Image (cartoon, grey):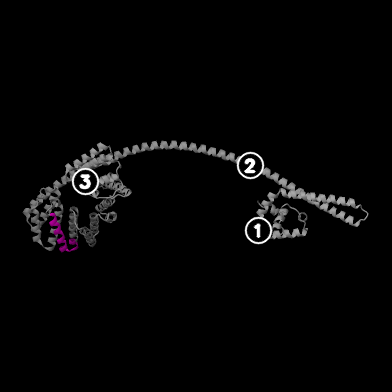
């Protein structure tokens, strides 16, 4: 029944991103409808195998193997090897199969090996979370049940809540089931009022449907019987009896619910004794005797005879009591032997399966290690190759940079030499300008002396003096021409200088900018006055104004300051 429970949730129609998963969901629905008819299951298995032979698509090979797991659903000894082989053949190829197989093993190993069961459930959970699968709420449900069976009720409730929150709103049956689980947890935590409230909520969810299918109807009755049990505990035997009678009337006509019928009968007997309704108890026992429990399994037979034994104890019918007690002893012994044999088979199968899993894991680890070594070798070779490439590239780059640096150094040296030559030329030009200015001063002085001589002396030959004056005038004109040429040769440099200084000091006048050229050449006020045909005092006034506009102190050498300007 555990494997059947595992497959029931797979039948739920869901939207899957992968067509392969959707195919297996549809196939599961088809198999579930005929799971009670082995012949039809065999036909589906053969059909899937034929598809594989025709197409060569492994999907159909796996679907045929998957179909075979629907034989012997209630026999774990037969089921476990099939599911293991399916899991091995699939090798995580189709996540639907991987999740369902791991989930199945978790359910199968729950009683015999809880630790191994938890490992399988965790694998299923990780895959379901990664795939955002609709398996997720059912895996959460299973994890909650694991905690519940381990008496860790608070943790169980957490996972039941996760299951409820991840369920689709249309999954009415499973949503009702989660509220039923909340009630079970509340009862264990001695909070019967909460158990009643949660179970009632689950019942309302199912009763909200206009029409119930068989599964929903049976689960609704089951929750009502559980609610009746809670009312009995809380002391409300009237409501408890009503709900349990509804369950009794539903189960008594259906052979597949023998276990549920006996459990309801046991609860009703308990109520009848509490309320003193012994006639109803005896009537219920007589009705149960009419059922043929000898064909039922040992567990159900034991439950029936225990109810009968308790009733005989109440009536103090010792003769019949001895017979029933002997029957119960025989049934319990047979049940213990059956369970022992079943547990032995399951344990052997569990050990074999575990060994297979470990062996295959070791093989997989070895293959993985070999692959890792191969990849490691490839990576090492690639790294060496890339290192050589990088080394070659860096070496060439360094050599190129070194060559560029040498070229830049040579170019800088050439520029330095040219600059030094330009500086020397400028110095020579300024020197010549100074000499010309000095010569002009001397010539002008001589010219003035000749004029004075001509004015003061009457006996001097005027013609000679005029000739001398004409010679001096010619000299002055030639000196001015040479000065103009010297200044014109520096016109580009001067223009750049004037633009730079006018950008930095926009408040300087055109005249002041022109004078800055002369100051930069370290010309004296007298020399500048000759070039500008003005007085030395005027030039000194201009110099003071220029320094003021530049915010320079008086003791700052203007020629030196202007010479350092970077243009």
Q: From the image, tell me which residue sits under label 2.
A: 411
Tell which residue pokes out farthest to the left in this image: 319
- Image side of residue 476 versus residue 79, left or right: right
Q: Does residue 553 appear anywhere in the picture?
A: no
Label 2 near label 1: C-beta < 8 Å? no
**What SS does tag 3 mark?**
helix
Q: Which mark is residue 36?
A: none
Q: Residues within 10 Å of mark 3 (few under 14, many from 20)?
A: some
> Is 78 situated above or below 302?
above
Residue 217 part of the magenta-drawn span: no
Q: From the image, tell me which residue sits under label 3.
A: 30
> Is 204 situated above or below 47?
below
Q: Which residues are magenta?
A: 231-251
Q: Residues within 10 Å of mark 2 (few under 14, many from 20)?
A: few
| Foreground of the two, 133 or 422 | 422
Position in image of residue 138 (x %, y %): 26, 51
Q: Residue at x 66, y 43 (%)?
A: 415
Q: Which mark is residue 506?
A: 1
């Amino acid at each position: 029944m555990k494997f059947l429970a595992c497959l029931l949730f797979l039948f739920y129609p869901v939207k899957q991103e992968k067509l392969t998963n959707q195919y297996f969901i549809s196939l599961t629905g088809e198999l579930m409808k005929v799971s009670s008819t082995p012949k039809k299951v065999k036909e589906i298995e053969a059909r899937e195998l034929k598809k594989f032979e025709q197409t060569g698509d492994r999907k159909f090979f796996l679907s045929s193997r998957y179909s075979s797991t629907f034989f012997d659903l209630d026999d774990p000894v037969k089921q476990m090897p099939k599911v293991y082989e399916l899991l091995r053949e699939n090798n995580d190829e189709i996540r639907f199969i991987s999740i369902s197989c791991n989930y199945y093993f978790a359910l199968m190993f729950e009683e015999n090996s809880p630790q191994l069961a938890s490992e399988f459930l965790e694998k299923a959970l990780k895959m379901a979370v990664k795939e955002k699968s609709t398996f997720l709420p059912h895996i959460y449900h299973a994890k909650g049940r694991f905690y519940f069976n381990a008496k860790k009720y608070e943790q169980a409730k957490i996972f039941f809540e996760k299951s409820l929150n991840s369920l689709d709103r249309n999954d009415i049956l499973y949503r009702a089931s989660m509220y039923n689980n909340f009630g079970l947890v509340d009862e264990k935590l001695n909070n019967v009022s909460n158990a009643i409230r949660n179970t009632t909520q689950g019942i309302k969810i199912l009763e909200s449907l206009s029409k119930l299918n068989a599964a929903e109807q049976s689960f609704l009755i089951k929750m009502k019987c559980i609610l009746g049990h809670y009312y009995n505990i809380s002391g409300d035997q009237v409501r408890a009896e009503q709900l349990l009678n509804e369950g009794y009337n539903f189960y008594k006509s259906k052979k597949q619910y023998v276990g549920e019928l006996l459990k309801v009968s046991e609860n009703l007997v308990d109520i009848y004794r509490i309320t003193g309704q012994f006639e109803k108890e005896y009537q219920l026992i007589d009705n149960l005797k009419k059922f043929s429990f000898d064909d039922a399994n040992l567990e159900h037979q034991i439950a029936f005879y225990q109810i009968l034994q308790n009733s005989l104890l109440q009536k103090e019918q010792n003769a019949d009591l001895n017979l029933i007690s002997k029957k119960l002893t025989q049934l319990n012994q047979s049940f213990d032997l059956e369970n022992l044999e079943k547990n032995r088979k399951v344990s052997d199968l569990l050990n074999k399966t575990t060994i297979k899993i470990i062996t295959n894991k070791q093989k997989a680890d070895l293959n993985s290690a070999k692959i890792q070594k191969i990849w490691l070798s490839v990576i090492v070779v690639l790294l060496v190759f890339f290192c050589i490439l990088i080394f070659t590239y860096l070496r060439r780059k360094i050599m190129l940079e070194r060559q560029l640096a040498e070229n830049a150094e040579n170019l800088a040296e050439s520029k330095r030499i040219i600059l030094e030559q330009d500086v020397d030329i400028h110095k020579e030009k300024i020197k010549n300008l100074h000499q010309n200015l000095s010569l002009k001063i001397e010539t002008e002085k001589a010219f003035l002396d000749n004029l004075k001589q001509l004015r003061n002396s009457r006996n001097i030959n005027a013609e000679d003096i005029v000739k001398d004056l004409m010679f001096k005038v010619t000299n002055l004109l030639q000196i001015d021409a040479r000065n103009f040429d010297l200044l014109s040769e520096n016109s580009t440099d001067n223009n750049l200088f004037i633009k730079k200084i006018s950008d930095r000091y926009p408040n300087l006048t055109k005249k002041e900018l022109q004078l800055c050229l002369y100051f930069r050449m370290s010309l004296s006020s007298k020399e500048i006055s000759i070039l500008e045909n003005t007085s030395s005092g005027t030039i000194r006034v201009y110099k003071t104004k220029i320094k003021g506009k530049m915010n320079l102190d008086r003791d700052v050498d203007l020629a030196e300051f202007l010479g350092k300007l970077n243009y």
